[in-house]
Image (spheres, rainbow, N blue to C red):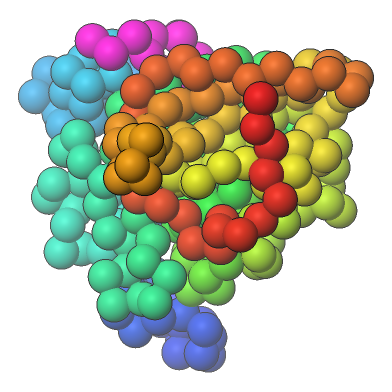
């Protein structure tokens, strides 16, 4: 197991001072015992993580067994600053770094759960997550797929995501720093691409990184009225089969806009 102390943080000039200390993350994320996480939760029916599953996910159609087990296992509180850990299981988007110019958020459990279920992730899949933040979605998907790559434009957030995976000995993940809207062509093709945040439209450069054999991309696309005013967005699924693309709007959704997704060549159908 990797041991990380505060000395490593001070050596990293890229980690934002406003964010929680890594020692806090380790304290939260390394609380283990010999009992499986799902059994530990069932011992305490009032546990907020179990309440999130039973009051937010299941009532809104998120019930795939492997996905529910992932939500039971991964501690959402390990990926946010201490100041908001007490409300981390609320049905709300939470700011990861309020003072950061990138304005990044941890999207609400219900929205994330619906996107992940819509992607129908298989144990053999390679998955790309755009805008993975501090790595909560990476940790979830690591339990569902063969390999997960997260792309993050904020190096401080990427550092936390890598550190969590290393401390928890999650070996099927990789977090890279880069421009969100161009994805990570080096690892393509992907069976699944997840955009973790709202976008105006889907850049073609991401579509081109999908596998041609039933590759799937899921995202929340912002809505607009005929007058150009903001409206409720939609969770969409794009499926690629050879040179054919299919786009289906599956559910209404709203979450904060991801940076870097304006003025790009987009896919429309």
The range drawn in magenta is: 59-70
Residue at 9 percent of width and 24 percent of height: 46
Going by the image, does 176 lie left or right of 244? Answer: left
Observer able to see residue 121: no
Q: Is residue 65 magenta?
A: yes
Looking at the rendering, which quadrant does residue 217 occupy? top right
Q: Is residue 20 magenta?
A: no
Residue at 46 percent of width and 80 percent of height: 15
Looking at the rendering, which quadrant does residue 50 occupy? top left
Q: Which of the two residues, 121 or 92, is positioned nearer the viewer here?
A: 92
Residue at 83 percent of width and 18 percent of height: 244
Quadrant occupied by the N terminus: bottom right
The chief SS type of the magenta part is helix
Residue at 12 percent of width and 50 percent of height: 86
Q: Which of the two residues, 69 or 117, is positioned nearer the viewer here?
A: 117
Is the residue 191 above or below the residue 195 in the image?
above
Is the residue 36 above or below the residue 224 in the image?
above
Residue 66, x across and y down, in percent? 50, 15
Q: Which of the two residues, 133 or 237, is positioned nearer the viewer here?
A: 237
Is the residue 123 above or below the residue 91 in the image?
above
Residue 121, x across and y down, in percent? 63, 20
């Amino acid at each position: 197991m990797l041991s990380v102390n505060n000395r490593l943080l001070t050596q990293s000039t890229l980690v934002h001072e406003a964010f929680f200390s890594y020692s806090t993350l380790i304290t939260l994320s390394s609380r283990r015992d010999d009992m499986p996480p799902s059994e530990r939760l069932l011992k305490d029916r009032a546990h907020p993580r179990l309440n999130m599953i039973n009051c937010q996910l299941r009532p809104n159609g998120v019930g795939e067994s492997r996905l529910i087990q992932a939500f039971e296992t991964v501690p959402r509180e390990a990926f946010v600053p201490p100041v908001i850990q007490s409300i981390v299981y609320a049905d709300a988007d939470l700011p990861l770094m309020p003072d950061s110019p990138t304005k990044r958020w941890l999207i609400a459990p219900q929205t994330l759960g619906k996107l992940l279920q819509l992607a129908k992730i298989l144990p053999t899949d390679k998955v790309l997550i755009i805008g993975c933040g501090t790595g909560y979605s990476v940790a979830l998907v690591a339990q569902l797929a063969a390999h997960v790559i997260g792309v993050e434009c904020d190096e401080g957030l990427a550092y936390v995501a890598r550190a969590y995976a290393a401390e928890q000995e999650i070996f099927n993940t990789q977090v890279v720093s880069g421009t969100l809207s161009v994805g990570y062509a080096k690892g393509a093709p992907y069976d699944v691409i997840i955009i973790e945040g709202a976008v105006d439209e889907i850049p073609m450069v991401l579509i081109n990184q999908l596998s041609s054999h039933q590759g799937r991309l899921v995202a929340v696309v912002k809505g607009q009225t005929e007058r150009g005013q903001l409206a409720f967005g939609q969770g969409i699924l794009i499926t690629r089969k050879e040179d054919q693309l299919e786009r289906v709007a599956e559910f209404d959704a709203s979450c904060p806009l991801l940076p870097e997704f304006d003025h790009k060549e987009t896919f429309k159908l």
